[in-house]
Amino acid sequence: MNEMTPPKTERTAALKGLGSARKRVEDARFTQGKGNYVDDIKLPGMLFGDFVRSPYAHARIKSIDAEKAKALPGVIAVLTAADLAPLKLHWMPTLAGDVQMVLADGKVLFQGQEVAFVVAENRYIAADAVELVEVDYEELPVVVDPFKAEAPDAPVLREDLAGKSEGAHGPRRHHNHIFTWEQGDRDATEKVLASADVVAEEMVYYHRTHPCPLETCGCVASMDKVNGKLTVWGTFQAPHAVRTVASLISGIAEHNIRIISPDIGGGFGNKVGVYPGYICSIVASIVTGVPVKWVEDRMENLMATAFARDYWMKGKISATKDGRITGLWCHVTADHGAFDACADPTKFPAGFFNICTGSYDIPVAYLAVDGVYTNKAPGGVAYRCSFRVTEAAYFIERMIEVLAIRLGMDSAELRAKNFIRKDQFPYHSALGWEYDSGDYHTAWDKALKAVDYEGLRREQAQRLEDFKAGKTRKLIGIGLTHFTEIVGAGPVKNCDILGLGMFDSCEIRIHPTGSAIARLGTISQGQGHATTFAQILASEIGIPADDITVEEGDTDTAPYGLGTYGSRSTPVAGAATAMAGRKIRAKAQMIAAYLLEVHDDDVEWDIDRFAVKGAPERFKTMKEIAFAAYNQAIPGIEPGLEAVSYYDPPNMTYPFGAYICVMEIDVDTGEHEIRQFYALDDCGTRINPMIIEGQVHGGATEGYAIAMGQEIAYDEMGNVKTATLMDFFLPTAWETPHYTTDFTVTPSPHHPIGAKGVGESPNVGSVPAFSNAVHDAFRAFGLTQTHMPHDHWRIWRTAHELGLHG
Ligand code: CDP
């Protein structure tokens, strides 16, 4: 140290590293209209594609006549399955080991399915031409109810699978059955349930919904016939995986494919899969020799791209008389729609649903999931969720409430009684997971205290008396949730997508003047990676975050990674970033020792520099070291300062949280008012508290939408009833509740900086909190279970059925 050296606190603050509420660096662009989304990409001579889609949910295609469309001036081509068949591109693999039609091959299986692809000089001509394509359909019987799909006389939906008794995930027992996935100990669980003091049983339905990102899905495909290179700009959450899959199915060598995810306006799982629009645009560009753009509209997005949830979860939970949980049994009927296009790691056909024992120490459990085909759109993506964790959390948090009713117990007390204790971590769950760390009691006590839980219950009891005395028509519901997530897929040993191991990566280059660029295998869709990953690095290598550029999404420059979804970025790519930073630091240590003329072991790290041990006034800052790396000939050390890390996490991370919702319900109108929403999250080491708060606000708002109104609903003919934003609830600022956020910090023991993911947590935790509040409001009148979404009509109907309208 010398007199000019700023104090440690000042040097630490200047880095804006871990824990700093650094403002999002992305926002200067976004708030000034300088974002660069797919639809902003305009290339010379670019054509536009648009789909002819099926009006029927199930029909045979007798003929397609595109002559009138082709005759329209400005129309370049109309592609059908017959055109794609010689290229073997009329079907494509799904992420779940199934296959899916790119363009209808003989029949259609859901309303909105892609039938033909019109390519024209502009979007308007393409849309006009779509109307001119004449398709002769013969309607077939429709199956929208997953329970009826397996009836012996149910229509055969997937004729391509006729006679196949084995699917990608084992035996199929019926022509509309996809798989059965079993976990846990069935015999032991049934034995415990048979002799238990108390068994609560319930059917919990998590309805079909949709991620509905503000920017819909789209791409621009450009085949350069001169250099043989295909470039595709698209709304891809996993650009490298798209490149590999595109290479495998097109036969184009992978080095000749460049996938670029530019700015993405929200993904939430919707942009993980491969859609027919991508394939058709690529083929159209190859055929026409010019770039082709396809961007779907809102109705297409809601009707045809990946849905989420649609799980019917039958549960049984047993306990002793005093409320000690002894066993959990669950059977799920999973409605996958027309093709199994769920985006789950290969070995997990129901994702990580086997986290459904939640935050509780449940000695024995059994889970079976049956996937079935219906005449609905394919998908089954993790909508702001880590592979079915949201469904699992909703299931267990409803089952806890139902059990509390059976026991006549307060559900806060029931939870606390059964939480996994701090000293039990690492905890092995009955369904096979090893939870890395947790301190549930501390979080729970903090949450209950923060909202004055006892006081709320007193107020609720008084309100109930007033209601019964005719003094008010409003009830109070207190919705409790303690959730445990599993995020950060994942260890390559058990997590892959289409055979690609789910590691992630970071490559860092330090420039001679001491600034840096870091490239990652992930891709931000609004989560603020450019801000937070620079913070991780700042703390690791002592270069201010403001001097570090973070770049993602271009497969020609970024190292290979599996992308961003399921809150995996921080647990996996964030870890890779820290590890790459440590490699930089290790080399920097050798350079510093050389410059200071001491042995490597005689220098120590001090925030932004290496100093000689015992002589802190003798040091070299990272800036000086970076310059030396490029201008000094150091014996035994290569010039330059770069590092790359591919990180395969040893385990997933298990963030958790305690959410409490206080809701007022008007029994006469079914309207609700969120009076208070308290969200305590524990995501381990917090990189940027402000971004975490933003993530919680966003996720909880999506959770609010799902719980209180958002759904993809079908009529019996398979018509989508909610394909516009008039019918599909997307909360505006006006409806969005006010949130109070809070936290505890329980670091992950295996993550290099102790961080767990957080992006999905607020969706996972808030849905049961909102829903439990609705249920709780009616608990005194005998309600145990009613299905989401709790829109005004359904709440009114519940009140009516309970006899509250006189
Ligand atoms: O994979 P995804 O980016 O959707 O989720 P995430 O890894 O949970 O990160 C969401 C955002 O929160 C990123 O900007 C993270 O760096 C940030 N975050 C944080 O600041 N601290 C954590 N412990 C976890 C995430």
Image (cartoon, helix red, strand yellow):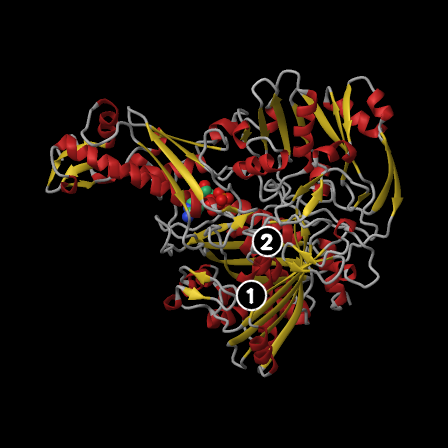
Q: Quadrant of the C terminus?
A: bottom right
Residue at numbered disc 1: 459
Residue topped by disc 2: 674
- The three-letter code of the residue at mark 1 reads Glu
Out of 643 and 768, give the one closest to the viewer.
643
Q: Nearer the viewer, residue 373 or 393?
A: 373
**Quarter-wise, where is residue 181 in the image?**
bottom right
Q: CA distance from mark 1 to mark 2?
A: 16 Å
Number of marks present in the image shown: 2
Residue 774 left/right relative to 53: left
Q: Which residue appears at 67% of the width and 50% of the height?
A: 340
Q: Position of residue 177 (x, y in %)?
A: 72, 59
Residue 514: quarter of image: top left
Q: Is residue 455 found left or right of 540 in the rendered image?
A: right
Query: Nearer the observer, disc 1 or disc 2?
Result: 2
Query: Tags 1 and 2 in contact by the CB under 8 Å rule?
Result: no
- Residue 325 seen in the figure: yes
Residue 723 placement (x, y as % from top left)? 74, 42
Considering only vertical position in the picture, is 255 above or below 535?
Answer: above
Q: Of 458 and 267, which appears nearest the observer? A: 267
Instruction: Residue 688: tell me if it is visible.
Output: no
Task: Please state the horizontal and vertical placement of residue 572, each as a whole percent of the image.
Answer: 43, 46
Give the numbered dot on residue 403.
none
- Report the side of 406 relative to 470 (left or right): left
Identify residue type, mark 2.
Ile
Task: Give the class, few, some or many, for how many residues have Cα within 10 Å of label 1's Cα (few <14, many ≥20).
Answer: few
Q: Quadrant of residue 772?
A: bottom right
